[in-house]
Amino acid sequence: MHYDITNAALAAQGKKRIEWADRDMPVLQKVRERFSKEKPLKDKVLAACLHVTAETANLMRTLKAGGASVYLCASNPLSTQDDVAAALVKEYGIPVFARKGEDKKTFFKHINAVLDAKPHLTMDDGADLVSTLHTKRKDLLTNMYGGTEETTTGVIRLRAMAKAKALKFPVVAVNDAKTKNLFDNRYGTGQSTLDGIIRATDMLISGKVFVVAGYGWCGKGFAMRARGMGANVIVTEIDPVKALEAVMDGFRVLPMEEAAKVGDLFCTVTGNKDILTKKHFKAMKDGAMICNSGHFDVEINIGDLKSLAKKVEKGVRPNVDAYKIGTKTLFLLAEGRLVNLAAAEGHPASVMDMSFATQALGCEWIAKQKRAPEVYDIPQEIEDMVASVKLASMGVAMDVLTKDQADYLAGWQEGT
């Protein structure tokens, strides 16, 4: 079996980590049980470009149980858990091409390695796999049934491809499922981003001024959690509705040029580029911390930061680099990449349980369809199934509509 990992000797440690996460993923367990019996992905080759974490490992196990031949590479150079990668190869027989800290050349070499398997299905987190397939590996497009996309940034890119008629196979926008973004993006990002910041800096959150760039589900979750730990939170936005929502949620909303003057920590969660640039770095005060919890490392213009710095001191702490600009020092966390995965362990397994159950079921759905090359939403029945199983696993019961209530909601004849 061909693979490329850092250290195969870490497999036993990685297996323990995978099994620990699996304890907290009951919905995915249910899906795996059914997949093992029904083999809905039999004879399908699946190329996945995801964060190589313990939670992802349990998703890969589920897809393999469903009959797929699975190949996995990393969607971020700093997010790979090397022991998990080793366990997937040595304990579960799944080819993995991922090394924590891999350079850009290796990153794309690994993407091409999973594409060499000639996949029928893709599973992406950020659309790098799909974009490579559509640009450098067009010969493989005739083989494709479809794919799934895990994150906001990837869905944005895919919708742009579909609008330009450049998308050549159907893709399910898993990120847009309520069982993903309402929970993973909000509660997962909120907790794991703070976890990464605290591990990297050992800073006291209480009393600090946190600037949150973007008030989508990820920004909402992070702002909420930061406030819960005593931070004074400022939100920056370009969307008037989201800015208004942030104000009514009790946050200050400022343009970034104003927020840059007062922030102690800046976190970008927008999915766009150049959120923090030269003019903002110049305005920041001495000791300001800068990090990203959006997908790519383009939200913070690191080129601008380097151009201003008379000296860069790497590794003043693990995952912290110091940029000396005039008489002040700015601190960049995790090289501007996902701080929650680079400096911590990413989202807790309990919330990834829903995301990855939705991911697996979305993959099954698209594999059974003959669809035009568009971006599709997750069917409502999948959303309902995932939420219902999650509630049951938590011991939570709901009310059920009576027949009269259902008829009332479905009709129009009965007035007030």
Image (cartoon, grey):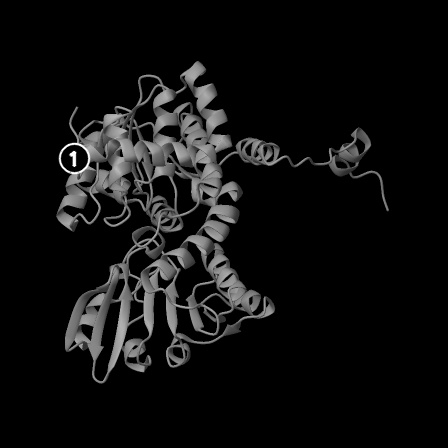
Q: Nearer the viewer, residue 146 or 64?
A: 64
Residue 293 seen in the current view: no
User: In the rendered view, would you say 59 is above or below 238?
Assistant: above
Residue 275, x across and y down, in percent: 34, 67
User: In the rendered view, would you say 232 is above or below 136?
Assistant: below
Residue 389, x across and y down, in percent: 57, 31
**Mark 1 Cα within 10 Å, few/some/many (few <14, many 20+)?**
some
Question: Is 281 positioned to the left or the right of 181 in the image?
Answer: left
Q: Residue at x 50, y 31 (%)?
A: 26
Question: Is 386 positioned to the left or the right of 275 in the image?
Answer: right
User: In the rendered view, would you say 248 is above or below 105?
Assistant: below
Residue 134, x across and y down, in percent: 24, 40
Residue located beneath label 1 in the image:
4
Which quadrant would residue 409 be assigned to in this image? top right
Count of picture labels: 1
Q: Residue at x 38, y 61 (%)?
A: 198
